[in-house]
Amino acid sequence: MRTNDLSLELDIHFLSQSQLESDLLAGDDFVQWSLRFGCIVFDEGTVRRALRLMAERQPWPNVERKRSHAAKSLELAHRFVATGDEDGALVQVRTALSLAARARLLSAGVFPLSRAELPAQLLELGLASGAHALARTIYDSPYLSELADAVRRGERLLERAREVAPVDRPGEDDRAEHALTLRSRRAQDLHQTSGHPSGREPRSSRPAAR
């Protein structure tokens, strides 16, 4: 089997059927994301049963767990920025800001899509500053001062997530339709407005991972 054309960021996760269903009902957003948007290569019935369970029970990811995970990641990002390591800081800030965006979206009743689609979802909620900060870490090479500001924006996303009251989440069909609609859009405005105000070229292209 050829693997040289696979992304270096590819991770393999193995779960038994019982663990899959347990994580699904416990609010694991990665499991739900995989079931909602993943490509099924082979299934002996485990995935179909999990999808049926999700349709029947309609579990929602655990917002508090995601918020806690994001807060720890933002703290680590702050420490990375303080070291002066631009490459390491960029990776960690991008990860932390993505987690903060997911927590904020979940608290608003919006299911997060892939990392590259998160900025557009934040814009849908009117969170332009967080959206553009995340887009910069995905597509560009911000200076350390910009990364430090991105960490602060991530912290504000979490603060605003706490202020959101429980909302009626859209139905399963509505969420699926909304996801397809967002996937069909290209966030060209973010890509264009994130730009390079300093004129500095990006160090490398950024993968659009979850």
Image (cartoon, grey):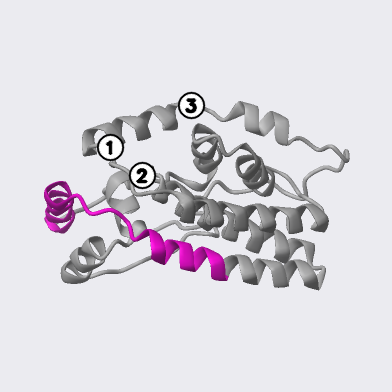
What residue appears at the point 32 percent right and 47 percent down from the top-left corner? 38
Could you say whether the residue bearing mark 2 is in a helix, strand or loop?
loop
What residue appears at the point 30 percent right and 30 percent down from the top-left corner? 177
What residue appears at the point 26 percent right and 69 percent down from the top-left corner? 15
- Residue 61 painted magenta: yes
Coordinates of residue 109 in the picture (x, y in percent): 36, 44
What residue appears at the point 67 percent right and 58 percent down from the top-left corner? 151
Above or below, 189 against 112 in this view is: above
Above or below, 62 against 121 in this view is: below
Which residue is under mark 1?
170
Above or below, 115 against 187 in this view is: below
- Residue 127 painted magenta: no
Amino acid on which the number 3 mark rests in the picture: Arg
- C-alpha distance separating marks 1 and 2: 7 Å
Amino acid on which the number 1 mark rests in the picture: Pro
Q: Which residues are magenta?
A: 45-72
Question: Which mark is first along the chain, 2 or 1?
Answer: 2
- C-alpha distance separating marks 2 and 3: 20 Å
Look at the numbered discs 1 and 2 and tell me whether their residues touch, using CB distance below 8 Å.
yes
Coordinates of residue 74 in the picture (x, y in percent): 61, 65
Which residue is under mark 2?
109
Q: Is residue 173 left or right of residue 195?
A: left
Could you say whether the residue bearing mark 3 is in a helix, strand or loop?
loop
